[in-house]
């Protein structure tokens, strides 16, 4: 690792510092393990049709509630459905909601944060707005939305995405506040750059690192959020496979099929653990000043 | 100090007003007829008209809003569409369950989080630090509802030492209450403990490298005195903030935990209200939660300014 701490957000060409960050990431074994697990999980979700040994909803009452075996790696549920296949298909809901929710929060949060950080007049309004949104704990927001819209995958995406907007706004706002005072921004102003150019070309690109770090925290949170909402019946509805739904039905079968509780949960833990490791590695790689702590 | 107090108070009130507007608007965003949504199956147009008048739904929207806020202020949150009982009473019955669960879980989280954080910071590069860090990472990565299910599987079914569900108030039978709440509280507190541990560790590391700690050591104070009396004391500021910031997570976690352990608390009430489409109850629950959350955050901020005098001077330390 180089000894000179390279500030993330200097006016140096971004390509160079990004390349160095990638190199640092590649040297971090934990982060690379996380990356491999994440890639495998995403591929498994995408290719579930091809690699799953059974279809997600094929019932086989002759093989109901079988413990894990060579044929059914994760066992079968009370309808004889193969749990390994269902976990693969359920990962689709996890990955979809994880990415869509974070996309939603960024799409709304980044412009708001830029405006609040750049225009002092707008700041109090945006801050009150985010405070109001933060006044609804995530599940309470989800409850309200589920009451209005009915539970569904889209409801889950909106609930999780909206809950994460204030966090994105805060990160973008504080980055904007910081970057606005930078010399190179003053230089751009002096050379006649308009507000739009400043925000688009000088501030936003330099705030990206902070946003990537934010995303590495929010994606695993969103994946757990989906599982929780589906577990409570506020998110994805059956027959769409979801890890949360699988756990909710497993709760009724504690005595007869304890493996039903174990595997979907392990899938969530493995995926979020991998994402957290990757996120920690990315944070260290993008901001070496922080990593020494 | 007074100016800071006033500003925070004012901010909270503004947020609260916005919250009531959102909740009020949320009910209007419900699909279909308001009155139908409120009373359910009733279909006689004359009765509906009568109810519309009774609920004040024939009034202009601003008037309705003011009436709604006025009623809420006087503790009238309407009546449950399903049970016909006042929403405020229903919530009042459920609240003690959730409060006992939350307090218990915060105590557990703070105890575990601080001791693990201190150990990890003081015993650097030892097995103890490694273990504390690993457990914290697991605490952050294991969703508490799965942790809860596994806990039931292990401690209530495989080795039946604790009850899998049910609630006993601490005021009725402290021992049974402890047995019933131990698993839910640990489950609810696990994530918080992990966050506290991580923050406490990094705050301790920073404090242990600070000048005042070096001075304390130079004065000849013993290791434990320096660690606990000086470094930890300053790290507690961070812990207070974290507990405050995590209150929302705790409220959400309580909903899930109560669902798993079948505790008749606020969270279970909330979920049941959604499934029975009990809109007045949902509205009340959301309003009460948001209000409590704003109030608690205000309290934490004030507490923070008492612990750390720098906050109230400029209000710009963070």
Image (spheres, helix red, strand yellow):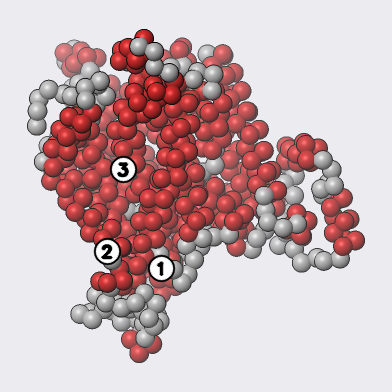
Q: Position of residue A272 (x, y in %)?
A: 30, 52
Element type at mark 1:
loop
Residue nearest the observer in this picture, B305 or A190: A190
Count of labels in the image: 3
Element type at mark 3:
helix
Residue B147 — which label? none
Q: Is residue B306 visible?
A: no
Q: Position of residue A271 (x, y in %)?
A: 28, 55
Q: Say left or right for B190 vs A240.
A: left
> How far separated are the C-alphas under marks 1 and 2?
14 Å
Compared with B26, B275 (above or below) is below
Residue at the location (23% across, 81% down)? A71
Q: Position of residue A65 (x, y in %)?
A: 35, 81
> How far separated are the C-alphas under marks 3 and 1?
25 Å
Residue hosting label 3:
A216
Circle 1 packing at 10 Å, graded few (<14), some (14-19), many (20+), is many
Residue A44 — which label? 2
């Amino acid at each position: 690792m180089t000894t000179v701490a390279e500030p993330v957000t200097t006016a140096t060409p971004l390509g160079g510092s990004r390349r160095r960050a990638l190199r640092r990431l590649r040297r971090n074994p934990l982060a690379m393990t996380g990356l491999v697990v994440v890639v495998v999980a995403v591929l498994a979700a995408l290719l579930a049709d091809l690699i799953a040994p059974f279809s997600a909803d094929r019932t086989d009452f002759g093989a109901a509630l079988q413990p894990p075996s060579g044929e059914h790696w994760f066992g079968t549920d009370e309808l004889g459905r193969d749990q390994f296949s269902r976990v693969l298909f359920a990962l689709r809901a996890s990955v979809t909601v994880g990415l869509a929710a974070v996309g939603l929060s960024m799409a709304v949060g980044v412009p708001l944060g830029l405006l609040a950080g750049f225009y002092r007049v707008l700041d109090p309004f945006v801050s009150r707005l985010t405070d109001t949104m933060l006044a609804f704990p995530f599940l309470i927001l989800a409850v309200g939305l589920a009451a209005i819209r009915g539970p569904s995958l889209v409801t889950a995406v909106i609930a999780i995405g909206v809950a994460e907007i204030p966090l994105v706004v805060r990160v973008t706002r504080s980055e904007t506040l910081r970057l606005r005072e930078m010399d190179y921004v003053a230089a751009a102003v002096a050379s006649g750059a308009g507000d739009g150019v400043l925000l688009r070309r000088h501030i936003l690109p330099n705030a990206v690192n902070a946003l990537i770090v934010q995303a590495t925290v929010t994606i695993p949170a969103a994946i757990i959020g989906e599982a929780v909402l589906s577990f409570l019946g506020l998110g994805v509805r059956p027959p769409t496979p979801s890890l949360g739904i699988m756990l909710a039905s497993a709760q009724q079968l504690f005595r007869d099929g304890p493996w039903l509780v174990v595997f979907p949960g392990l899938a969530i833990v493995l995926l979020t653990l991998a994402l957290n490791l990757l996120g920690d590695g990315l944070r260290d790689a993008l901001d070496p000043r922080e990593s020494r702590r | 100090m007074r100016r800071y107090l006033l500003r925070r108070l004012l901010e909270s009130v503004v947020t609260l007003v916005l919250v009531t507007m959102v909740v009020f608007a949320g009910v209007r965003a419900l699909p279909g007829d308001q009155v139908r949504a409120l009373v359910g199956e009733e279909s006689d147009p004359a009765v509906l008209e009568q109810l519309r008048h009774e609920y004040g739904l024939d009034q202009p929207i601003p008037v309705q809003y003011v009436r709604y806020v006025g009623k809420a202020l006087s503790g009238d949150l309407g009546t449950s569409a399903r049970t016909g009982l006042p929403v405020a009473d229903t919530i009042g019955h459920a609240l003690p369950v959730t409060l006992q669960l939350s307090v218990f879980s915060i105590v557990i989280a703070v105890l575990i989080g601080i001791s693990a954080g201190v150990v990890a910071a003081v015993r650097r590069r030892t097995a103890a630090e490694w273990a504390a860090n690993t457990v914290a990472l697991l605490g952050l990565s294991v969703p508490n509802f799965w942790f809860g299910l596994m806990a039931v599987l292990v401690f209530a079914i495989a080795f039946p030492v604790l009850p899998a569900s049910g609630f006993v108030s601490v005021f009725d039978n402290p021992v049974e209450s402890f047995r019933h709440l131990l698993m839910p509280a640990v489950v609810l507190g696990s994530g918080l403990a992990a966050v506290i541990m991580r923050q406490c560790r990094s705050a301790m590391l920073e404090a242990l490298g600070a000048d005042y700690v070096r001075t304390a050591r130079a004065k000849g104070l013993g290791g434990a005195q320096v660690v606990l009396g000086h470094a930890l004391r300053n790290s507690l500021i961070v812990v207070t903030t974290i507990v405050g910031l995590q209150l929302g997570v705790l409220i959400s976690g309580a909903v899930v935990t109560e669902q798993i352990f079948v505790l008749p608390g606020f969270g279970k009430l909330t979920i049941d209200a959604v499934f029975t489409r009990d809109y007045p109850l949902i509205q009340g629950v959301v309003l009460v939660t948001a209000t409590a959350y704003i109030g608690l955050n205000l309290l934490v901020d004030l507490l923070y300014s008492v612990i750390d005098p720098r906050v109230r001077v400029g209000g710009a330390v963070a």
